[in-house]
Image (cartoon, helix red, strand yellow):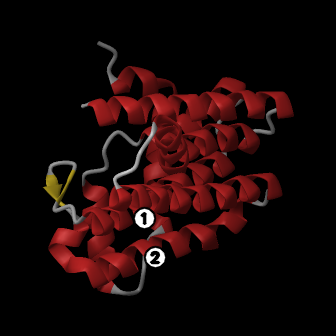
Amino acid sequence: MIKIENITSPIADDLNNFNNNLKKATRSNVDLVNVVIDYALKNKGKQLRPILCLLSAKILSKPNELSITAASLIEMLHVATLIHDDIVDDSSIRRGWPSVKSVWKNKISLLMGDYIFSQALSNMIKLKNFDALEVLSETASRLSQGELLQMERAKTKNMDEKTYLKMISDKTASLFSASAEIGAITVNGSDKEQNALKIFGEKLGIAFQIKDDLF
């Protein structure tokens, strides 16, 4: 079995820089915010999306400061989405731990998800690249639409294959796709390289979600 460490070994230093950058980008003057964020990031999972971003940059060139920033933005969008998901799904557990929603209830959790989203938006300007900003903006829109589509179909109990693929494409694959594409953008990959990685990320995200749903 391939371990995640084998995959990330080429970007080990970049991942350390990413985690430091992520912590710095989410800091607040409000103690409660820092406590909740530290809790949300404590069990950080595999960090597949920032890893994909950094690896995409690595196969084309050397990940740089913009690559680190982009990886942080991607993870912030992901964490904010997870917090909101747990509110919508009324989930008490996240990655084997009590969810933020379970510990701090809905109001604080909702505001925390919004805060992380807002921090991601305010940090986007650091990318200094309109193509990357466009990708992230479209991704944020797709994430919301995917969640709303899931809620709609759960309520009506109407889910065919076409709708399911559309839902997981927006809700999950969009962030994988953005991760790979933006990784290429940060190291000035060609349009062809950016598009190839975008498509790869989309397909990988769909496969990932199908496997997750089967489990």
- Is 131 displayed left or right of 198 in the figure? right
- Nearest to the observer: residue 151 or residue 51: 151
| Picture quarter with the C terminus | top left
- Nearest to the observer: residue 13 or residue 168: 168
Labelled disc at residue 114: 2
Q: Tag 2: Cα neighbours inside 10 Å, few (<14), some, or many (≥20)?
A: some
**Disc with the residue nearer the chain's start (2 vs 1):** 1
Query: Residue 205 location in percent, x, y?
Result: 50, 35
Q: Name the amino acid type tagged 1.
A: Ala
**Element type at marker 2?**
helix
Labelled disc at residue 184: none
Q: Name the amino acid type tagged 2.
A: Asp
- Is 9 displayed left or right of 166 in the figure? left
Q: Is residue 105 above or below residue 191?
A: below
| Picture quarter with the N terminus | top left
**Element type at marker 1?**
helix
Camera sees residue 82: no
Residue beneath disc 1: 80
Q: Is the C-beta separation of discs 2 and 1 under 8 Å?
A: yes
Q: Residue at x 26, y 74 (%)?
A: 35
* Location of residue 98 by image quarter: bottom left
Query: Residue 141 location in percent, x, y?
Result: 61, 62
Query: Residue 151 location in percent, x, y?
Result: 39, 61
Residue at the far top: name it. 1
Camera sees residue 181: yes
Q: Residue at x 55, y 47 (%)?
A: 175
